[in-house]
Image (spheres, grey):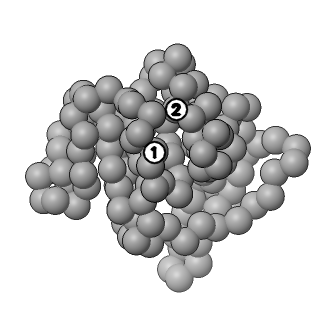
Amino acid sequence: MSGSFPLTLRVAERLVVVIGGGHVATRRALSLLAAGARVVVVSPAVTDSLASSIGRGDVEWRQRTYEPGDLEGAWLVQTATGDPDVDGRVADDAEARQIWCLKGGDPDHATAWAPAVAQVDDVTVAVSGGGDARRATSLRDAVA
């Protein structure tokens, strides 16, 4: 994780693409939606929770597998397919387009990392665990 710089992104009204439709993709898509992002999910299938947001028109769904053009206009992309080959292609395409990429399950090859976050009253606590999500969660919980 050397060479990283912590920051908070203002994603409101910006396009963020989530590749995958499982539980990790759902958590990330709903968090991004809560932050005001325009969220597009690309996946052949999605969880019931994500389907509810899609049904309300809160999230756009491209019901198919990933295609390189899916990143057009994106500021940020989250890979969460569970398929290392697909996630790797997405990360490579994002790198070529200079789009920050949260690479699910492979922080060493990501260009962005999401911290573990806790909200305490009007204070937000965000903790990076050096690429170790469990460590970040434990530290976040201790601080909160």
Residue type for callout 2: Val
In the image, what residue occupies the spot 71% across and 51% down? 128
Q: Position of residue 63 (x, y in %)?
A: 21, 34
Q: Are marks 1 and 2 in contact (CB under 8 Å)?
A: yes
> Quarter of the image containing the N terminus?
top right
**Which class describes the residues within 10 Å of circle 2: few (<14), some (14-19), or many (20+)?**
many
55 with respect to 43 (left or right): left
| Residue ID for mark 1 | 71
Q: Position of residue 62 (x, y in %)?
A: 25, 40
On the question of residue 135 being in view, the answer is no
In the image, what residue occupies the spot 87% across and 48% down? 3
**Which class describes the residues within 10 Å of circle 1: few (<14), some (14-19), or many (20+)?**
many
Q: Reading the chain from its start, which is encountered first: label 1 or label 2? A: 1
- The alpha-carbon separation of the residues under discs 1 and 2 comes to 8 Å
- Badge number at residue 92: none
| Residue ID for mark 2 | 90
97 with respect to 78 (left or right): right
Q: Residue furthest bottom?
A: 122
